[in-house]
Image (cartoon, helix red, strand yellow):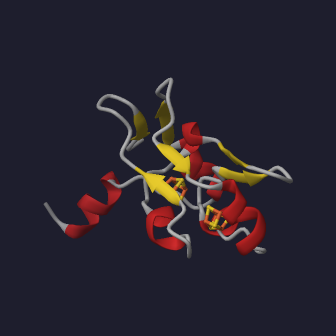
Amino acid sequence: MEGDEIMSLVPRTNTLEEKQYLLRYRADSQSHLHVLNNDVCATSCPDKLCTLFCPGEVYKWEGKRMSVGYEGCHECGSCRIGCPYENIKWEYPKGGHGIVFRLA
Ligand code: SF4
Ligand code: SF4
């Protein structure tokens, strides 16, 4: 198969909306993500970095605690290394759950 033929099989995704259309989630009933200590977020992390680097916009600061919308997690693993206080416990979702990437 030639390169052009291969590329014709790859879906073209130009906009964020088109890319997000290719994502589906099979949410578990329990979170695979846990903020270990909200006090650390409140007192030591003024920029709430996880709310900035998470591509799934999973983390939302609600004044006194971090809301974790685990259902929208892209499983990129960034929060495992991105939290400067190692304050996020990250695991893969249980088998059969989590994000599903559609190819078309
Ligand atoms: S990056 Fe870590 S310490 Fe900062 S707000 Fe998020 S979970 Fe809390
Ligand atoms: S794994 Fe990626 S998408 Fe999921 S919560 Fe962490 S940073 Fe966000």
The answer to whether 43 appears left or right of 79 in the picture is right
Q: How many marks?
A: 0
Relative to 76, is 93 above or below? above
Residue 29, given in percent of the width and then of the height, sits at 50, 23
Quarter of the picture containing the C terminus is top left
Report the front residue among 92 and 5.
92
Relative to 66, is 2 above or below? below
Residue 69, given in percent of the width and then of the height, sits at 63, 41
The answer to whether 67 appears left or right of 100 in the picture is right
Q: Residue furthest right?
A: 63
The answer to whether 13 appears left or right of 5 in the picture is right
* Residue at 63% across, 57% down: 16
Residue 52, given in percent of the width and then of the height, sits at 68, 68
Quarter of image, res 96: top left
Residue 24, given in percent of the width and then of the height, sits at 49, 35
Report the front residue among 38 and 96.
38
* Residue at 43% across, 59% down: 76
Report the front residue among 2 and 46.
46
* Residue at 38% across, 44% down: 103
- Can residue 75 be seen here? The reply is yes
- Can residue 45 be seen here? The reply is no
Relative to 40, is 56 above or below? above
Relative to 31, is 87 above or below? below
Q: Residue furthest left?
A: 1
Quarter of the picture containing the N terminus is bottom left
Q: Residue furthest top?
A: 29
